[in-house]
Image: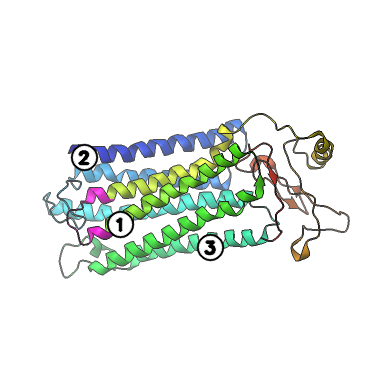
Amino acid sequence: MKNSEAKDILLSQILVVIATILVIARLNLRLRIQKRKLLLSDILMVAAWISGLITAAFSPVFAVLDAFDPSVHTTLKGYHGGTANLVLILKLLFASSFPFYTTLYLCKAALLAVYLQVFPEFMVKRLRFLWATIWFVGISYIITIVILFCICLPINRSWDLRPSRTCPKWTYAVTFHVGWGLSFLGDLLVFILPWLIVPALHVRRTLRLGIYFTFLLGTVNMAVSLVRFVMIWKAGADSSISLSTIVFWSALDVNIGLVVACLPSLRPYFGSRTKSQEPSRESNSWESTRKHSGFGNRTICFHSQQRGSEAWPSSSDSHARYSSIDQTVVGSWDDTKGFTDANDIELRDLPGARTRDVKYGK
C-alpha cells in the first residue's frame, strides 16, 4: 500500500471514529443525562452510523486488492491483479452503493426527525414545507435504489467482463447523475429548513451565532458533495483520476454527513447550564404559566390571539392555548393530552429563548 493510499484511508477512518464518538455522546445525553427513551431521530442516527461503518469497511478491502493503486482508473483500466480479483472488485463496488446511499438518506432522515419536534404547530406553511421535504427525501431514496438495482438486469451483468454482457456505459452515468442530483437537492432542502424557524427566535447574539454555526456546517457537506460530483464527472473523460480519489471523496461525503447530522442534538453539551434571568415584570406571568404547564421556569408559553384562519386551536372551555418552547420550540398543545413532554425534544438547552412576532401560518 502506497503512502497516498494509506493517508486517504486514514483520513476517512478518522472521520468514522469522530462520527462514532458523536453518536455515543448523543446516546449518553439521551439515556444517562436526560434519562429519556430514544427518540426517532436517535434511532435513525444510530442506523445511519451502522450503515456508515459498513460503507467504510469497503475501503480497506479495496486497498488490499490493490484497487487504490494510482494507475487504476475509475473504470478499473490499469488494474493488473488478475481476473478473479477484478470481478470481486466490481462486485464490491456494486454492493457498496447500497450502504453508501442508505447512510446519506438516513442522515437526512435523522435531521428531519429533529425538525418535526422543533417546528411549532402554528407555523402551518413551514410544517407543510417540512412534510413536502420528508416525502421528497423518502421518494428520492426509493428512486435511487430502484435505479441502482434495475437499470441493468440481470444484476450479475454489473460485474460480467464479457463485452456482450457487461452493462453499457450510459447506465453508470444515469445511476450516478440521478443518485447524486436527488441526494444533493435533498441536502439543500434540509439545509434550508432551519432558517425558516431560527430567525423567529429572539435569543442572545452569541447563542444565535452558535445555532447558525451548527447548521452552517451543512454547507461543508454540500461542498464536499459538489467536489465528489466534479471528480466523478471528470473521471469519465480524464483517465488520470484514480479510483482511490473517487472512493476518498465519497467517503468524505458520507462521513461528514454523519458528523453534521449528529451535531444539532449535541447542543445541550455546550449550552449554558444556568437559568436565564428575566425582568421581574415578566416573572409573575411566567410563574403562573409554569403552574399550568408543569415544565418549570425554563418553559416559555405563548398566548394565542385570533389571527385569521390560522390562529391557535380553540375550545369552548378555554380562551388561550400555549406552545412551549425550551431552547428552540419544545412542545405543542394536544387537546386530548395537553402539553407534550419537554424532555423528549431535541435542542433543549437554549435558555432565555423567546419568539419574535411571527405571522401565523408563515
User: What amino acid does circle 1 point to?
Assistant: Val
Queried whether the magenta region covers residue 117, the answer comes back as no
Queried whether the magenta region covers residue 244, the answer comes back as yes
Q: Position of residue 129 (x, y in %)?
A: 58, 61
Task: Quadrant for the C terminus, please.
Answer: bottom right
Q: CA distance from mark 1 to mark 3?
A: 28 Å
**Mark 3: secondary structure:** helix
Residue 32 appears left or right of 257: right
Q: CA distance from mark 3 to mark 2?
A: 41 Å
Q: Position of residue 158 (x, y in %)?
A: 25, 62
Q: Of marks 3 and 2, which one's residue comes earlier in the chain?
A: 2
| Residue 265: quadrant of the picture | top right
Q: Residue at x 77, y 65 (%)?
A: 308
Q: Is residue 172 above or below residue 295?
A: below
Residue 135 appears left or right of 352: left
Residue placed under numbered mark 2 in the picture: 4
Q: Residue at x 39, y 62 (%)?
A: 181
Residue placed under numbered mark 3 in the picture: 135
Q: Of marks 1 and 2, which one's residue comes earlier in the chain?
A: 2
**Mark 2: secondary structure:** helix
Tell us which disc is closer to us: 3 or 2.
Answer: 2
Q: Which mark is residue 230?
A: 1
Query: Residues in magenta?
Result: 233-246
